[in-house]
Image: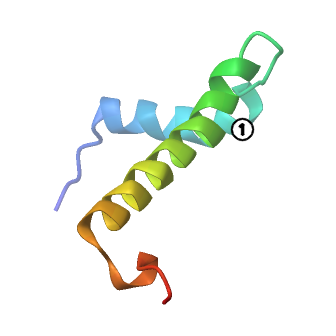
Amino acid sequence: MAVKKNKFVEEWNGKREITEKTFSVELDNAPILIFYLMVVPYGIYAWSRGEFISRGDRRYKEMV
């Protein structure tokens, strides 16, 4: 059985191997990076916590 290489898969594999060498974080990229690594997860947490509170989840009921 002869196997034919797919040039797109081979190109993707080559780019994947050198990603850590080409990735760079500069001061220009810092606000975007902070936004996606801190603000978005906290927003998801706050939204889901608000849903639990509004639905009356047992973890958020007031202790009497």
Rendered residue at 63%/40% (across/down): 37
Is 11 displayed left or right of 4 in the figure? right
Give the residue at mark 1.
20
Q: Say which quarter of the image contains residue 52.
A: bottom left
Estimate how packed mark 1 is, as few (under 14), some (14 to 19) or many (20 or more) residues with alpha carbons within 10 Å: few
Report the residue that reaches farthest toward the right: 27
Label 1: state its secondary structure. Answer: helix
Report the residue that reaches farthest toward the left: 1
Colour setup of the view: rainbow
Q: Position of residue 59 (x, y in %)?
A: 43, 82
Rendered residue at 32%/30% (across/down): 8
Q: Say which quarter of the image contains residue 25.
A: top right
Rendered residue at 24%/67% (across/down): 55
The one nearer the camera, 51 or 4, is 51
Residue 18 in sight here: no
The one nearer the camera, 45 or 13, is 45
Q: Position of residue 31 (x, y in %)?
A: 70, 19
- What amino acid is found at the position of numbered circle 1 in the picture? Glu
Dividing the image into 4 quarters, which one contains the N terminus? bottom left
Rendered residue at 76%/32% (across/down): 21
The one nearer the camera, 6 or 2, is 6
Report the residue that reaches farthest toward the top: 28
Is 2 displayed left or right of 50 in the figure? left
Q: Above or below — where is 7 with respect to 60?
A: above
Q: Position of residue 5 (x, y in %)?
A: 29, 42
The one nearer the camera, 17 or 10, is 17
